[in-house]
Amino acid sequence: MNVRLTSIGILLVLFIFTVGCSKSHKTVEDIQETAKENEIENQEDEDLKEINIQELEQKLSAASYSSESEPIQRSMEGSLEYVKGILPEGVEEIDRTYESEVGVTAVIYKADGIEFEVRYMHPYKDNGKSDEYDLSKTAGIALTLK
């Protein structure tokens, strides 16, 4: 009887060991499969982000207009509202500089980790002087990713 119990005990231990090893082997396979799936998802996210950036660049390009070839007179406030309607929600202004030699106000905006440069082109003042720009109006807007 003792031999019988011992052999049953040994068989039980072998069975448990075999089942335990096959489960841990399967776990390694699961981990490898999960890692591959995560890698594929990350690549898909990268591809989607690249597509979104391309779409955004096209949108910005389509919304831009030149002060020389297709001028559109707007107030500066109207231009700011126009641009905020194009840029993503939650956009914040992080820098603004005026380039007096060309009559352009360059503004850097940031949203979702992406920086945008918007160049507001000002027309000359109506008083006839060709070297003074009217900063209360715009005649062109160039929107680009920075």
Image (tube, helix red, strand yellow):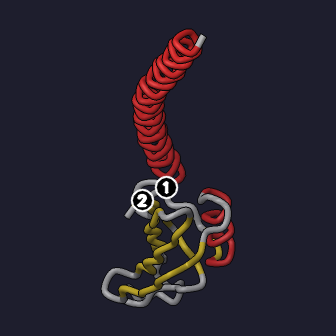
State if disc 1 and disc 2 touch (CB < 8 Å). Answer: yes
* Crowd around label 1: few <14 · some 14–19 · many ≥20 (10 Å): some
Task: Give the secondary structure at mark 1.
Answer: loop
Residue 63 placement (x, y as % from top left): 54, 52
Task: Give the secondary structure at mark 2.
Answer: strand
Question: Residue at 47% across / 77% down in the picture?
Answer: 107
Which-is-in-front pick, marks 2 and 1? 2
**Gap between marks 2 and 1, in whole Å?**
9 Å
Question: Residue at 55% across / 62% down in the picture?
Answer: 112
Question: Residue at 41% across / 59% down in the picture?
Answer: 145
Which one is in front, 36 or 121?
36
Quadrant containing the N terminus is top right
- Which mark is first along the chain, 1 or 2? 1
Judging by the rendered image, the residue that carries numbered circle 1 is 64
Q: Is residue 134 above or below residue 120?
A: below
Q: Is residue 67 above or below residue 126?
A: above
Which one is in front, 11 or 73?
11
**Three-letter amino acid code of the residue under disc 1:** Ser
**Three-letter amino acid code of the residue under disc 2:** Thr
